[in-house]
Amino acid sequence: LAKTTQPISMDSYEGQEVNITCSHNNIATNDYITWYQQFPSQGPRFIIQGYKTKVTNEVASLFIPADRKSSTLSLPRVSLSDTAVYYCLVGDGGATNKLIFGTGTLLAVQP
Amino acid sequence: EAGVAQSPRYKIIEKRQSVAFWCNPISGHATLYWYQQILGQGPKLLIQFQNNGVVDDSQLPKDRFSAERLKGVDSTLKIQPAKLEDSAVYLCASSITSGGTQETQYFGPGTRLLVL
């Protein structure tokens, strides 16, 4: 089964760029890589998704190397409100290829 | 656009009692998911519906959990009887079509269950 590995936690300061790397060595050929953000007492929220190379939207960038065995979520100039848990997701490779949420990365942004 | 609605937001019950959660997905979304999120862990998929049919319920403890999605819209998740280890947040999500990994899931606020 496909599995993701992320750091448990990261610390940063306001205004810095934060990069969270996720490894997914067994990603399926047709699988996408998706990142979600979750604040306390809320459901996860979609941030960004990609298949290969680089994807950028209004809140983040996603870098995926050619072998697709890892990916890096980049948050430019973080603020206190970016403090949350960030999940990297791929399919589990099973019959329905459902998404598997790991424990995620708790990003703590300090002033 | 209205988001995914869930009720109740909080529920406290004693073990061996039963409880039910309700979810109203985003209008027009074909796929509906129920997740269980235990404190400190990521959400775990319990059951996935496409319209009113079950796509995946491999992680649903079927001896005590049941779910239905009548008419392919609203859904209810029931626990009977509840155990202490069922204390968690129950999240409902929906997506537009078939629920593949490339499809964005939209989550509701969740129902926080405490079993005493």
Image (cartoon, helix red, strand yellow):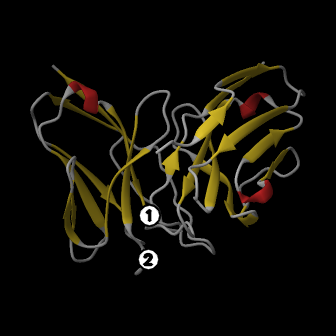
Q: Chain of mark 1?
A: A
Report the disc number at residue A1.
none
Residue depicted at x 61% and y 71%: A96
Q: Which residue is at the front of the view, B83 or B66?
A: B66
Q: Please identify the residue farthest to the bottom as the structure is shown.
A: A29
Q: Position of residue B108 (x, y in %)?
A: 55, 40
Q: Position of residue B113 (x, y in %)?
A: 69, 27
Q: Amino acid at mark 1?
A: Val
Taking the image as shown, residue B10 lies to the left or right of residue A5, namely: right
CB within 8 Å, label 2 to label 1: yes
**Which corner quadrant of the image does residue B70 belong to?**
bottom right
Q: Which residue is mark 2?
A: A28
Taking the image as shown, residue B26 lies to the left or right of residue A102, namely: right
Residue depicted at x 47% and y 67%: B101
Q: Which residue is mark 1?
A: A90
Taking the image as shown, residue A89 lies to the left or right of residue A97, namely: left
Taking the image as shown, residue A48 lies to the left or right of residue B60, namely: left
In this rendering, the answer to whether B8 lies above or below A72 is above
Q: Chain of mark 2?
A: A
